Amino acid sequence: MKEERLIMLLRSDPNEGMKKVIDAYSGLVFSIVRGRLSGLCGSAEIEDCAAEVFIRFNSALDGLRTDGSVRNYLAVIARNTSSNYLRSKSSEAAVDGEEALLEIPDGTDVCEEAYRKQLVDGIMEEIRKMGHPDSDIVVRKYYFNHRSADIARDLGLTVANVDVRSHRALKKLQEKFGGKDENQY
């Protein structure tokens, strides 16, 4: 079915139009979402994210031009939705790490733990301020221990670009919070 006719069907009979969209483009959507979330999420989470793409597409139909491309529109929504899902997953992992600091066993220096928690909060805030894609790169590379090649593939960057961005991000964090200068080694 031509995209122009598909858009007209979506406007005249949204339920039937969405069935056709899902039939025609579910492979594309799953491919994009799986490529961005594989290794981080299970298959159920990938399916949930893909379903969210179609829900967002359905909600945004008014913004789709009659001469527009359903394929391109879905691809952008899939990319953005999976990036948002990755960000929320990274934030959840950071919160889990922060909550672990709150469980202080007996004999632990409470002042030291409070300082560490404050430091973690500050670092996470600075990472969030870096914005996309730098914050994604830092979290994936240094929190989830992903390889630069995998991050580059998922974010549509080159490996060299990922390495340069991660190096610059670490430099900013070192300047802000102190730490060993890599030239001291």
Image: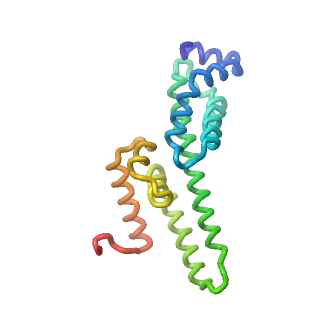
Q: How many marks?
A: 0
Q: Is residue 79 above or below residue 27?
A: below
Viewer-nearest residue: 142 or 58? 142
Image x and y of residue 50, in percent: 61, 36
Q: Residue at x 36, y 59 (%)?
A: 168
Give the percent coordinates (x, y) of residue 75.
52, 31
Expressed as whole percent of the image width and height from the top left, the position of residue 169 reads 40, 60
Q: Which quarter of the rendering shows the C terminus?
A: bottom left
Left or right: 27 with respect to 15?
left
- In the image, residue 138 sits, relative to residue 26, either above or below, namely below
Apparent side of residue 158 relative to residue 59 in the rendered image (left or right): left
Is 3 drawn above or below residue 179 in the view shown? above
Q: Percent from the top left, x then y, of residue 33?
A: 54, 38
Along the viewing direction, whichever of 26 and 60 lies nearer the viewer = 26
- In which image quadrant can residue 114 be found? bottom right
Q: How is the image coloured?
A: rainbow
* Image: 66 above or below 167: above
Give the quadrant of residue 112.
bottom right
Q: Residue at 59%, 51% (x, y): give it.
A: 88
Which residue does the image show at 38% across and 44% down from the upper left? 157
Name the residue nearer the viewer: 125 or 113.
113
Q: Residue at x 64, y 42 (%)?
A: 44
The foreground one among 169 and 112 is 112
Point out the image quarter for the N terminus.
top right
